Amino acid sequence: MPWDERDVVSLRDEFVRLALADDANIRRLCRRFSISPKTGYKWIGRFQAHGPGGILDRSRRPGNSPARTAPEVEAAVLAVRDAHPAWGGRKICVRLLTLGRKDVPAPSTATAILRRHGRISPAASSAAEPWQRFEHAAANDLWQMDFKGRFPTARSDCHPLTILDDHSRFALAVEACTNEQTETVRGKLITTFRRAGLPWRMLMDNGSPWGNDLEHVHTPLTVWLMRLGVGVVHSRPYHPETQGKDERFHRTLKAEVLSGRSFRDLQHCQRAFDQWRPIYNFERPHESLGMQVPASRWRPSPREYPEQLPPVEYAPGEDLRRVQTLGWISYRGHQARVPKAFTGQTVAIRPTATDGLFHVCFLSHKIATINLNQVPHET
C-alpha cells in the first residue's frame, strides 16, 4: 500500500522523525507506515542531507524560520507567536533555541515583548495556570481516548476523535469523524494500531460507544479491544478530570486549531488536524515534560496489530460458560448477569479466596461476580 493520500506530508514527516530516534526499528516502522524499506531509507537520507526541506513538497507552515525573515530579537519572538498564537513566552524561547538562535531572550522578556505588541491581553495572563497530572511510567502503558465536542462545518458536523499517550502526551490520532458510532471508532483505531502498535491499556469515559452506564460498562468496542489484549479502563462517572491529559489536549486543540476558524467540510478539518499534529508532537514544547516535545518520550509499541483477532482461549480444566442472550449465564443453579456486549462469548468461572464467591472472567478481565451464598434469583 502506498503512502496515505489523505496527508502524505505529515505521514512522511512523522516517519522520518521516528526513524531517526536512537533505538528506532526502521524496517518495522516501514511496515507500520505501509512503505518499502527502499522508500523509507530514501526519505531518511534526504532529510539527513537537506533537513526538513528535503522531504517536504511545500513549506511546513509560515514563520518556521524567523531568523531569516527578521534578525531582531523582537521580530523573532513575534514571528513564532504569529505562527502559534496560543504559545506563551516559555514555549517561544524553547522553540527559538531549538531553531538554533543564539540571542534568545529570557522567557519573562519574551512575555514582555508579547504584551508590548498587544499579543497578550491582561485577561489571558490572569487565566494562565499550571497543569500537573500523574503520568504512567512508560510510553504505551496507557492511551487516553475521547471525542472532543462536535462542531459544525458548512456541510456537516465534525466529531473530533483524539487518542493521546499518557506518558509522553504524544498525539497518536486526531480524526475528523462523521459520527461517534462503534464502527467509525473501530476503523480509526485500526489505522492507529497499524501505525503505532498496540498499547497495554486504554482509558475512556462512560459515554457511547465505549460504555454509558453501570449496566453497560462494556460495549462491542471494548470487547473487541479485550480480544486484542488491550485492557479497558473507564473514567469515574461525572469526573472528567480522570482523563485530564486528553481534556487538556482538547483545550490546546481548540486554542491552536479551531478557535476563530470555519471549515468547509470534514476533509478541510482533517487537513488542519494533519498539519497541526506533527507540530504538537515534534515542535511544540510541553510544560509538563520539562519543555521537551512529546516525541522525545514516545516510541512505537513493539506489540503488532493482528489483522485477524486471536482466538478466545483459557487454561485446560477451567470452568467455562457461553454467555446467553442479554448477558445471562448459569452456574450451580445461580443466574448471573454480565454486560450484554459479551453475548455469545465464552467466559471462565474462577474461584476466589472467599468461599462461595466466584469471578466471571473474559480472558484475563473480571466482568462479573457470582455469590453462591446468596439465594438464587428466579428468572
Image (cartoon, grey):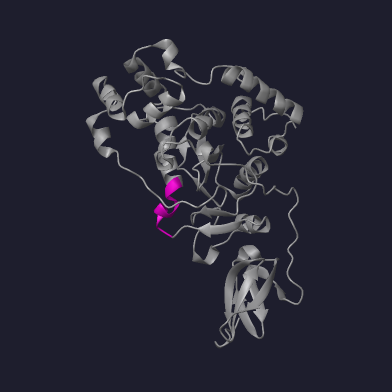
Q: Is residue 185 above or below residue 91?
A: below
Range covered by the magenta-colored residues = 237-245
- Residue 129 visible in rendering: yes
Quarter that holds the N terminus:
top right
Looking at the rendered image, the quarter that the C terminus falls into is: bottom right
Q: Position of residue 36 (x, y in %)?
A: 76, 30
Q: Which picture quadrant has residue 359?
A: bottom right
52 displayed left or right of 37: left
Q: Quadrant of residue 358?
A: bottom right
* Residue at image coords 61%, 54%: 221
Total numbered badges shown on the rendered structure:
0
Q: Looking at this view, is 73 or 122 the one in front?
A: 73
Magenta part mainly helix, strand or loop?
Answer: helix
Does the segment drawn in magenta span residue 93? no
Up the image or down, 318 lies above or below 118; here it is below
Q: Is residue 157 above or below residue 44?
A: below
Q: Is residue 243 magenta?
A: yes
Using the image as rendered, state which of residue 169 and residue 179 is in the foreground.
169
Q: Position of residue 178 (x, y in %)?
A: 56, 39
Q: Tell me which residue sits at (44%, 18%) in the image.
A: 63
- 56 horizontally vs 168: left or right: right
Which of the pair 228/158 is nearer the observer?
228
Give the side of residue 21 with respect to residue 90, left or right: right
